[in-house]
Amino acid sequence: MKEFNLPHFFIITPLYCEDLAIEEILNKSNIPLSSLKQEKGGLNLSNVSIEEGLKLNYLLKIPVRILLTLDEFKAKDFPRLYEKLTKIKWNDFLHDHEMPKLHFSSEKSLLFDSRKVEKVLFDAIEFNYKKNPPKQLGESKVGKEIFIRIHENKVKVSIDTTGDPLYHREENFSPKRVKGSIRENLAYVMIFAAMKYLEKNKNTVINPMMGSGTILKEAFLYNSLLTKRSFSFEDFTFVQKKKIKKPSLPKEENCFSHFIGFDIDDYALQMSKDNFQNSEECSEKICLS
């Protein structure tokens, strides 16, 4: 298993947004460009501390989720797969007898039966529990998800550190949407890409077809962190022991001063107002009509 002092992460991004995701990481963290490697649909992140990688969940708004690689190895049959999976220290991530959800894909491999792979995974985890009984830390608050990707004989085992996708900005808050609404991370992409052409403040965002107000709200909360929700990694057993602190961003004034939205659909207008109802200073800076 990879040591925690030099872990490997894979950051899943929307297609064709990989460059902007790299730029966001460089802007919001001290991670160097040399630690990032781009590929279709995501970024490989290496040579960072476990804390740096996990804290990106609080910082990033373009990606979808962040996976932590637990191991990479070769296996062409199920006995070998079981042997390697038993060597992963599952107690660092899972609570007592907790069984994760499996996401599995296979290409050009004899290990293609997802049901058999799931059974091997669960047997390996159970073996680990019996060999090294986990310390009681209470019930798991977030269901864990394991990703196993097999290409030819190469196996990559990862655990999701995010939980609900990163475009879910707040805990227990599901924004009201009109048909065809844009996701929050894609709305943020539009704003982030436009930033290089704007002055630092005194900009007004105008959306003449605002729908449920996603673009306006992403602009309004542009400088905020994702601290109003929980993440899967916060429930990892080793994280609960370490008590990783939430990061902070330098206090900067939002480059947008006013937010104006219009829509001819009264239902969409009401949804926009509902989606903004918990935001601070709405009455002063936001005009929806």
Image (cartoon, rainbow, N blue to C red):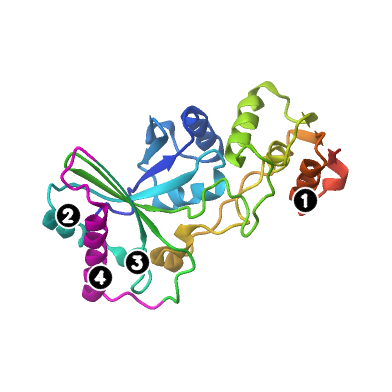
| Real-space CA distance between mark 4 and mark 1, rounded to the nearest whole angstrom | 46 Å
First reached walking from the N terminus: tag 2 or tag 4: 2
First reached walking from the N terminus: tag 1 or tag 3: 3
Q: Residue 99 carries which label?
A: 3
Of circles 1 and 2, the one toward us is: 1
Q: Is mark 1 on a helix, strand or loop?
A: helix
Give the side of residue 269 with respect to residue 122, left or right.
right
Residue at 43% across / 68% down in the picture?
241
Residue picked out by circle 2: 81
Residue 218 lies in the magenta stretch: no
Residue 131 lies in the magenta stretch: yes
First reached walking from the N terminus: tag 4 or tag 1: 4
Give, as a single range, the part of the protein colored magenta: 107-136
| Real-space CA distance between mark 2 and mark 4, rounded to the nearest whole angstrom | 15 Å
| Real-space CA distance between mark 1 and mark 2, rounded to the nearest whole angstrom | 50 Å
Q: Is residue 55 above or below residue 119?
A: above
Across and down, in percent, residue 102 comes to 34, 56
Residue picked out by circle 4: 126
Give the residue type that dot 3 points to: Met
Residue picked out by circle 1: 274
**Label 1 environment density (alpha carbons within 10 Å; few <14, some 14–19, many ≥20):** some
